[in-house]
Image (tube, grey):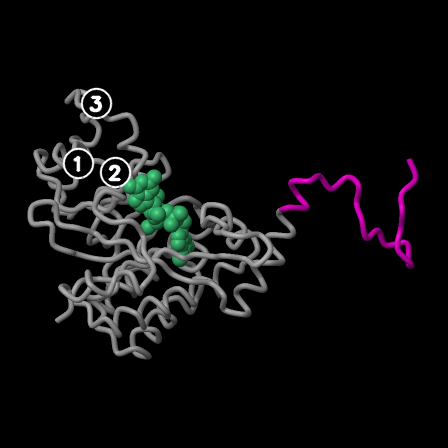
Amino acid sequence: AMKRSGKNGVQFYDPAMNAEAQARLRLETRLRLAISEETLGIHYQPQVDVATGALVGLEALVRWTDTDLGVVSPAEFIPVAEDTGMIVALGSWVLDEACRQAAEWQLDVPMAVNVSPHQLIRADFVDVVRAALRRHALAPHLLKLEITERLSLGDPGRAAQHLAGIERLGVRLSLDDFGSGQSALASLMALPLHEVKLDRTLLVGVTADPQSWQVVAALLALARGLNLPVVVEGVETAAQLDALRTMGCGSVQGYFTGRPQRPSELRGIVGHAAS
Ligand code: C2E
Ligand code: MG
Ligand code: MG
Ligand code: MG
């Protein structure tokens, strides 16, 4: 078959580029635009104390509705942002906006912000976090950074150094997605953590049968032994919440106790947690 070429013999359409690659390129182009035009948004999901039902934190979750593509899930665009380096600008924006919102609400519980390993290894990471706190006059203990081990990046020493810097600022650190198979037991000891979040996949398939809760129960016991508070993610039913309460689980985050919501929908809830 003949290949069509541009003026200088440069192909502007590559027939070998499959539909998937084209869709991804389109996503990438639109995401770049969204970041530059700041058309991203943030929803906030409550974290709730199992025993008292009190709000103990909020997690900032980035949202993107593109004029062409419609709603795009973070599960789809965060990996693209990471591969292209756009995660740095995106992550800084989320961090800044979440700090601004926490300060506006005068929260007295922490605002949790997801941080990509790509952000973490950057030389200016600690400065970026410090600057966001200063800009909005947010107390460091009211910010919590959620880190994952989805990707192991070249220099673990550098990441550890930056996390120590974060800890010196007084910002809290949470290990996200624990038990998803992408987090190592060793990091529970190696990192200056203040909290562990059990991945929601651990709740998939748990039933009324106590046997099916063994893994969750064991991880709760492990965290307790290490004096690490736990947040269990993905709680969708009253039965799950009851089982977790029986096991002495500290706090939960899930559709049952509160979906991620836009800021305007949360005013009533955050009012009670405001100082
Ligand atoms: P994550 O940090 O583990 O966030 C929790 C995810 O679980 C959120 O998905 C939340 O909407 C979802 N979730 C909460 N409760 C339930 C439940 O009861 N059932 C089910 N099925 N899902 C529940 P979301 O918002 O789609 O985000 C997906 C992932 O994208 C996040 O997982 C996080 O890894 C990443 N992400 C989101 N926002 C950011 C961000 O600002 N920066 C970075 N680097 N990553 C982000
Ligand atoms: Mg998270
Ligand atoms: Mg998580
Ligand atoms: Mg997760």
| Residue where numbered disc 3 is placed | 212
Mark 3: secondary structure: helix
Q: Give the foreground label among 3 and 1.
A: 1
Task: Give the image quarter of residue 37.
Answer: bottom right
The disc placed on residue 238 is 1
In the drawing, does residue 141 fall left or right of residue 154? Answer: left
Question: Looking at the picture, which amino acid does disc 2 mark?
Answer: Glu
Q: Is the magenta stretch mostly helix, strand or loop?
A: loop
Q: Where is 250 relative to 57, above or below? A: above
Which residues are drawn in magenta?
1-23
User: Along the polypeptide, which appears first: circle 3 or circle 1?
Assistant: 3
- Residue sitting nearer the eye, 191 or 252: 252
Some atom of ligand 1 lies within 8 Å of the CB belonging to the residue at label 2: yes
| Residue where numbered disc 2 is placed | 236
Question: Looking at the picture, which amino acid does disc 3 mark?
Answer: Ser
Task: Give the image quarter of residue 63.
Answer: bottom left
Quadrant including the C terminus: bottom left
Some atom of ligand 1 lies within 8 Å of the CB belonging to the residue at label 1: no
Name the residue at 26% across, 69% down.
Answer: 102
Mark 2: secondary structure: loop
Label 2, residues with CA under 10 Å away: few <14, some 14-19, many ≥20 = some
- Residue sitting nearer the eye, 85 or 105: 105
Residue 67 visible to an observer of this rendering:
yes
Determine if the magenta segment contains residue 90: no
Quadrant including the N terminus: top right
Mark 1: secondary structure: helix
In the drawing, does residue 50 fall left or right of residue 262? Answer: left
Real-space Cα separation, disc 1 to disc 2, in angstroms:
7 Å
Question: Looking at the picture, which amino acid does disc 1 mark?
Answer: Ala
